[in-house]
Amino acid sequence: FSAKQMDLPLEGKKVLITAGPTREQVDPVRYFTNYSSGKMGYAIARAAAGMGASVTLVSGPTALEKPAGVMFIPVESTDEMFHAVMKEYPEMDLVIKSAAVADYTPRIKYGEKVKKKNESWSVEMEKTTDILSVLGEKKERQVLVGFAAETGNLEGYALDKLKRKNLDMIVANNVAQEGAGFSVDTNRVVIYKKDGSAKEYPLLSKDKVAQEVLAQAMELMPL
Ligand code: CTP
Ligand code: CA
């Protein structure tokens, strides 16, 4: 290897990262979302840019600063994220889906604010598109990496997603564990690859986890 390749191991590679929550509107003043802060995905975007990749970050709403040197595509809903990701996908070498995508969206989006005239309000929800599953179906040369946020049976659920969504690798974390999951700056993950290998990490900073995720994904990429 030349010194350059060692410093910039992702030079010439196009990497797509999704991050943050998605937001599903029910009326002009209300929405459904989740606790994702976006920190894990932004850390991966920064790390990939630092390794020389050409990085596209598709992000739901977060309080974070846009990382320098990445192409930034802000989105709100799952549907917007889906369309942004599908447009970029054919060009990509590596896709890392760390976003916490809303699984359901209100069936009806009211054009006007819903007034509190009734004693209760039931909002009917319908499933959103599973973006990662569609990417898995349409996969060509891309290396596809998913995340799995679980509160139990980490291995079982993660391996099921790895297989069902046709992924090359999945980063599983137990979000009920201290120091892992949403909002905090640390994470504890297990990385499963489609060859059956599993690697368990101790509690690390999200920046360190990002380096590891990229190092493991790089092993799956053609040179
Ligand atoms: N994902 C996605 N589109 C969705 C839901 C999830 O692309 N509509 C992706 C996430 O970005 C993540 C992976 O799928 O990389 C797993 O997300 P997770 O919420 O853990 O799994 P689900 O398949 O949604 O199943 P469940 O929430 O029931 O565990
Ligand atoms: Ca989900």
Image (cartoon, helix red, strand yellow):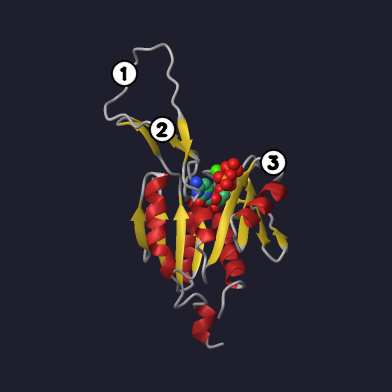
Q: CA distance from mark 1 to mark 2?
A: 18 Å
Secondary structure beneath disc 2? loop
Q: Nearer the viewer, residue 101 or 21?
A: 101
Q: Nearer the viewer, residue 31 or 107?
A: 107
x then y, percent, for residue 162: 63, 56
Cβ atoms under marks 3 and 2 closer than 8 Å: no
* Residue drawn at point x = 34 percent, y = 15 percent: 116
Q: Which mark, by number, is residue 115?
A: 1
Kindly identify the amino acid type of the residue bearing the numbered disc 1: Lys
Secondary structure beneath disc 1? loop
Of labels 1 and 3, the one closer to you: 1
Earlier in the chain: of badge 1 and badge 3, it is 1
Q: Does the Cβ of the disc 1 residue fall within 8 Å of ligand 1? A: no
Q: Residues within 10 Å of mark 1 (few under 14, many from 20)?
A: few
Q: Is residue 12 left or right of residue 203?
A: left
x then y, percent, for residue 210: 55, 61
Residue 110 position (above or below residue 65):
above
Q: Which mark, by number, is residue 72?
A: none
Residue 94 position (above or below residue 157):
below
Q: CA distance from mark 1 to mark 3?
A: 39 Å
Of labels 3 and 2, the one closer to you: 2
Kindly identify the amino acid type of the residue bearing the numbered disc 2: Arg
* Residue drawn at point x = 39 percent, y = 63 percent: 88
**Farthest residue, direction bottom:** 2
Which residue position holds label 2? Answer: 107
Which residue position holds label 3? Answer: 152
Kindly identify the amino acid type of the residue bearing the numbered disc 3: Gly
